[in-house]
Amino acid sequence: MFTDLPLDELHGYRPPRHEPAGFDAFWRRTLDEARAHDLDARFTEVDAGLALLRTHDVTFSGFGGHRIRGWFLVPHAAGGPLPCVVQYLGYGGGRGMVHDWLLWPSAGYATLVMDTRGQSGPNRPGDTPDPVGSGNPGVPGKMTQGLLDPGDYYYRRLFTDAVRAVEAARGHEAVDAGRIVVAGGSQAVPPRWRRRAGPRAGGRVDRCAVPDPCPPRRRDHGFRTVRRAHPLLRG
């Protein structure tokens, strides 16, 4: 593995943060709007043929009240509320099959896997559409979808879904609401979510596991370009 800094310096590394005026207010308003819709988290138990785990098909209301799919897995022999891992997905994939997510529950954790709206892939297909269109042309994929308007940007919707997923997990009787971990890589939803939205998700998030954040030092996807393109965000 190649790194730019020695390990002891990496442990304490904090990238510079240059947030435009109105950044906190933007996300506060976004989450308030999402919470105007009933979370309505539903956990439907399904038989996946896994003798040691209880598995559930999950739906909850994310950005705009749109229904987001997921999986919820919990050890069958759990004696009480468990710490929970909320798992986000890498770019270009969906929730796949419940059998794709056995690591954390096999280690004794409750696990909620959030499907990624509008994304799917050959290895892990998705089940959640993104009903919001984009007002600007862009390259294939999600990185520039809605980029010219911060209110229409794709990742505004996805990050909001991520917060609501934690709220859904926290409300399940099998989950210790005080012990929540967010995990994932590639699109790097967890670090950005934990920094801004996490403190407003109705309680503490204890840990963030990110093996391969991408891009690790870029402000919330597209926000710099949006700031230049949108006069309301010029500081």
Image: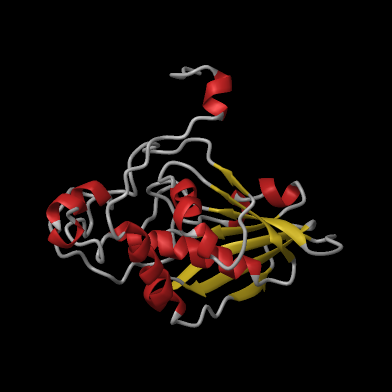
User: At x 17% / y 62%, what residue is drawn?
Assistant: 232
In the image, residue 84 sits, relative to residue 90, either above or below, namely below
Location of residue 205 by image quarter: bottom right
| Rendered position, 232 above or below 184 | below
Image position, residue 6 (x, y; %): 52, 17
Q: Is residue 118 visible?
A: no
66 or 4: nearer the eye?
4
In this picture the colour scheme is secondary structure
On screen, residue 92 above or below 149: above
Of residues 204 and 172, which is closer to you in this image? 204
Q: Quadrant of residue 111?
A: bottom right
Position of 226 with respect to 171 (left or right) is left
Q: Is residue 84 left or right of residue 145?
A: right
- Taking the image as drawn, is residue 108 in sight? yes
Q: Position of residue 157 (x, y in %)?
A: 36, 64
Residue occupying image coordinates x 36% and y 71%: 29
Q: Position of residue 1 (x, y in %)?
A: 51, 18
- Which is more toward the observer, 43 or 158? 158
The residue drawn where x is 44% and y is 82% is 36
